[in-house]
Image (cartoon, rainbow, N blue to C red):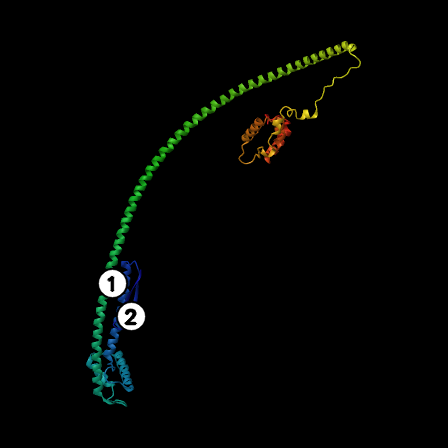
């Protein structure tokens, strides 16, 4: 964080100096040097002004000066400066005599009246004394301020130097700690390299052993494959021999079968020739009596007409869709139970079977009926 130092000289000049955060001794030395140079310039300016006051008495304190008195003062100041350039003044009395020579014997002011030469000198001497006392007070105040500022900067520099050395000591300790850590890391790295070398050597030994075993296994596998190929070749040859033998036997059986067939045909022709003369020329064919249509369609109704009358209606029979979670075993049990209770023959159950099925089950029934034909109820 930055801070600011405000300095005010005895001449009323002000100066603000910015002090940056993180001070160092070199930074403070440079700042103090700049402040000393500035204060020195202010001191030289004060000396010049003091010399000017000694050479030219001020007319500000006392009676109010008119325009004529100010012009006389300026003229006297110019004259004194010219004489100073020619030769150096040697004392206060000489400066006063020169001032007496430059001032007129009598000054006429329209507002204040006339002043004599002695009154003007007395007024200048009084003003010079007042300014001299004031300059002494300002010089003492300026010296006190400089001493205070120097002490402040000294204390600030001491504090910053202490902080700087504290930071320096911390950095030194950090560097030593880093060196120790680096030393530990180097030792650990060396140990790790040793372990890695041992692991690599172990891996090389395992790889060499595995390669040797692999070579042995390859040799064994090649021998095993050759043995299996020989056995397979023997089996193939045996199968080929069996096929050839079967083909030979098949040809023999075909010839024997054809020979037997020819013998049978010859025997039949011989029998037909022997018995044909004894057969009658016209014979009445045998006709079987056909049952009635009703009896052939429903032969079971005549045996038990009472049970056939009590057969349940179609809506009382169970249905089966074949979708979702179905139980076809339950359907079969219900149909068997009705058949047993009412002594229903299989023909009636088969006639009602398409009505028992719906949706997917009906499609399945028609497909099975077309593929397998007509069957009794136990088959279904």
Q: Are marks 2 and 1 in contact (CB under 8 Å)?
A: no
Q: Is residue 320 left or right of residue 127?
A: right
| Residue for badge 1 | 153
Compared with residue 20, is residue 315 higher up or lower down, i.e. above or below? above
Dot 1 surroundings within 10 Å: few (below 14), some, or many (20 or more)? Answer: some
**Residue 27 picture location, percent across and down:** 29, 60
Tag of residue 372: none
**Residue 285 picture location, percent across and down:** 76, 17
Q: Compare residues 112 and 2 and report the one nearer the observer.
A: 2
Q: Quadrant of residue 306?
A: top right
Residue plotted at (43% across, 27% down): 211
| Residue for badge 2 | 14
Label 2: element kind:
strand
Dot 2 or dot 1, earlier in sequence: 2
**Residue 239 picture location, percent across and down:** 58, 18
Q: Compare residues 120 and 235 and report the one nearer the observer.
A: 235
How many numbered discs?
A: 2
Q: Which quadrant of the rendered structure holds the N terminus? A: bottom left
Q: Which quadrant of the rendered structure holds the C terminus? A: top right
Q: Compare residues 100 and 275 and report the one nearer the observer.
A: 275
Q: Quadrant of residue 66?
A: bottom left
Residue plotted at (26% across, 55% down): 164
Q: CA distance from mark 2 to mark 1?
A: 18 Å
Label 1: element kind:
helix
């Amino acid at each position: 964080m930055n801070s600011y130092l405000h300095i005010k000289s005895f001449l009323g000049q002000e100066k603000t100096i910015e002090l940056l955060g993180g001070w160092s001794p070199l930074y403070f030395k440079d700042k103090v040097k700049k402040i000393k140079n500035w204060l020195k310039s202010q001191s030289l300016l004060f000396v010049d002004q003091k010399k000017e006051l000694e050479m030219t008495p001020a007319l500000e304190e006392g009676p109010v000066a008119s325009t004529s008195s100010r012009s006389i003062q300026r003229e006297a100041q110019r004259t004194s400066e010219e004489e100073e350039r020619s030769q150096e003044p040697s004392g206060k009395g000489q400066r006063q005599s020169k001032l007496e020579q430059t001032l007129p014997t009598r000054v006429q002011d329209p507002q204040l009246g006339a002043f004599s030469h002695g009154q003007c000198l007395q007024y200048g001497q009084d003003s010079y004394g007042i300014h001299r006392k004031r300059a002494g007070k300002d010089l003492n105040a300026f010296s006190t301020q400089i001493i205070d500022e120097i002490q402040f900067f000294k204390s600030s520099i001491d504090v910053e130097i202490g902080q700087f050395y504290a930071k320096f000591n911390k950095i030194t300790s950090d560097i030593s700690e880093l060196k120790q850590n680096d030393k530990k890391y180097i030792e650990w790295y060396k140990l790790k390299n040793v372990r890695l070398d041992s692991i690599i050597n172990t891996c090389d030994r395992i790889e060499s052993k595995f390669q040797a075993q692999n070579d042995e296994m390859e040799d064994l596998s090649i021998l095993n494959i050759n043995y299996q190929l020989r056995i397979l070749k023997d089996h193939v040859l045996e199968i080929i021999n069996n096929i050839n033998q079967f083909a030979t036997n098949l040809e023999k059986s075909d010839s024997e079968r054809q020979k037997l067939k020819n013998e049978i045909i010859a025997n039949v022709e011989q029998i037909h020739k022997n018995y044909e003369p004894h057969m009658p020329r016209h014979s009445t064919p045998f006709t079987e009596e056909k049952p009635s249509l009703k009896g052939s369609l429903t032969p079971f109704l005549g045996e038990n007409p009472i049970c056939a009358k009590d057969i349940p209606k179609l809506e009382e029979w169970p249905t089966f869709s074949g979708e979702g979670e179905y139980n076809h075993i339950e359907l079969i049990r219900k149909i068997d139970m009705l058949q047993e209770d009412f002594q229903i023959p299989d023909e009636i159950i088969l006639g009602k079977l398409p009505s028992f099925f719906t949706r997917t089950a009906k499609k399945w029934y028609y497909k099975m009926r077309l593929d397998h034909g007509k069957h009794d109820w136990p088959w279904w």
